[in-house]
Amino acid sequence: MSRRNNSSRRGRRRGRDRSEAQSKIAGSVQLTCVRCGKNIRNPQMALATPENEPIHFDCAIQEVAEAENLGAREKICYLGQGSFGIIKFKSGSSNRDFSIRKRIPYEKAEQSVSWRKEMREKLDFGR
Ligand SMILES: [Zn+2]
């Protein structure tokens, strides 16, 4: 995951204040996971379902894994940009040796996720 905004690390004197403010803002965005029904504590890490509902990152992985027939040595991984993939590890080798068997687009388009946009706007405010 490389969703984190780089600028959040750049602050010097006010760096600590800023990260506190950020977590407050993130906490003010109330999201409920569409799959497990629990509160999403880290909206920055949440994904959007194809129906644009917020979902825990882990819940999304589980959902994709259940929808796919995973073979032995296969695993769902996040590939970035709203896509998952089925990773197939080669037998008898280290976990570094793998190929992507299938790409699974999950989020439609990041821009269309209204709650994420709202959160980003709040984070950008007062920079
Ligand atoms: Zn969940």
Image (cartoon, rainbow, N blue to C red):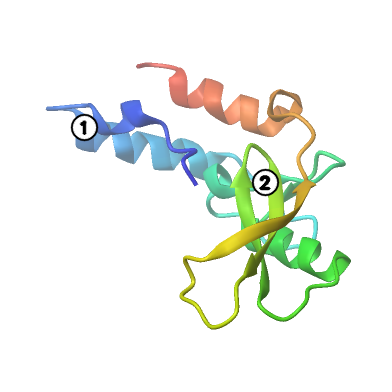
Residue bearing mark 2:
47
Quadrant in which residue 120 is drawn: top right
Residue bearing mark 1:
15
In this image, 120 relative to 77: left or right? Answer: left
The Cα–Cα distance between marks 1 and 2, rounded to whole angstroms, is 27 Å
Number of numbered discs: 2
At x 66%, y 69%, the residue is: 75
Numbered disc 2: secondary structure: strand
* Quadrant in which the C terminus appears: top left
Asked if the residue under mark 2 is in contact with the one under mark 1, i.e. CB atoms within 8 Å, the reply is: no
Q: Position of residue 28 (x, y in %)?
A: 54, 40
In this image, 21 relative to 97: left or right? Answer: left
Quadrant in which residue 21 is drawn: top left
Q: Amino acid at mark 1?
A: Gly
Task: Relative to 39, say whether 3 is above or below.
Answer: above
Of 67 and 56, the residue lying toward us: 67
Residue 81 seen in the current view = yes
Q: Position of residue 56 (x, y in %)?
A: 66, 56
At x 21%, y 32%, the residue is: 15
At x 51%, y 66%, the residue is: 97
